[in-house]
Amino acid sequence: MKKSKNLTYSLVLALTLGFIGGILETYSLFNRGYFALMQTGNLISIFTNLIKLDWNSLGISLIAVFSFIIGLIIANLIEYFCIKRQKDYHPIELFISAILLSFIIFVPVEFNEVGTILEAKDFSFSNVFSNVLLSLIGAFLLESFRKMNSINFTSTMMTANLQRMVHSLVNAEENHDKKELVNGIDYLFLILTFSSGVCASFSYYYFLNPVFKNESNYLFSILPNLILVIPIILIFFFLFIYLFDLRRKNKAIFSE
């Protein structure tokens, strides 16, 4: 496999993870009440709720942040032992993410008495459990996949990607640098795929919630999760198999 082909696959995989990041981040906010994959909002929530003495919201934010930290620790330990044994950690962390995500299927979205989605501050088991799992997944995605065509990227947080996109495009204009132009376009595509994931996730539940919100049958109530999450799990497993096969052939996509 030629290097240019590896770089192309690197971009495709990064865009795929960006799309998944948009789906999961939107799902965590609008169906579980909090941003679970990104922790800036949760850190703000911790200290604002500490001032307000809103212990439920404070507790949820603390759980999300600590879950994320635990996920980062686990991811780093996996990377340390894999690198020490000259093995690729990307497939392993994708596999773990897929397993964690599969549990979310069985946790139905909860609604309050007026028919709106139960907020995380209500401290329901469903929201707490789901946000813990999503925080762990967010940690794995952030820690494991940091390179796109040999440049830094994140699949769940777009602030840095926006900054890098503008930086690359400005440099491309000032220095007539085609490489920087390509980098800027790569970041643009990543932001657009993340945004597409946001639109897909929000639209999906926005139109389905009126159908499922008063459903008392458990199997029927988890159907929206099943339809949304199963394709993501299949993508994770496909990437797992693909990256594992590349590693077996000593061909890396994500260079550190």
Image: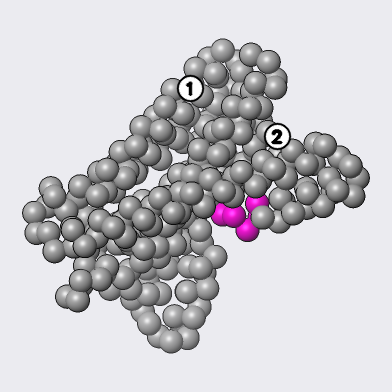
What x and y, as percent, mark residue 45?
47, 74
Residue found 56% across the figure and 32% down from its top: 12
What x and y, as percent, mark residue 109?
24, 59
What residue is shown with label 1?
Answer: 242
Q: Is residue 209 magenta?
A: no
Magenta part, dominant SS: helix
Q: Quadrant of residue 231?
A: top left
What x and y, as percent, mark residue 161?
65, 51
Could you classify mark 1 by the number of other residues whose Cα lies within 10 Å: few (under 14), some (14-19), or many (20 or more)? few
Residue found 39% across the figure and 29% down from its top: 237
Residue stretch in magenta:
157-161
Quadrant holding the C terminus = top right
Give the farthest residue toward the left. Answer: 217
Q: Is residue 116 left or right of residue 74?
A: left
Q: Is residue 226 left or right of residue 68?
A: left
Residue found 18% across the figure and 58% down from its top: 211
Whether residue 204 is visible, yes or no, is: yes
What residue is shown with label 2?
Answer: 150
Question: In what element is the residue under mark 2?
Answer: loop
Q: Is residue 219 left or right of residue 120?
A: left
Residue found 53% across the figure and 45% down from its top: 193
Residue type indicated by callout 2: Ser
Q: Nearer the viewer, residue 135 or 20?
A: 20
Residue type indicated by callout 1: Tyr
Question: In what element is the residue under mark 1?
Answer: helix
Q: Nearer the viewer, residue 92 or 182?
A: 182
Whether residue 132 is visible, yes or no, is: no
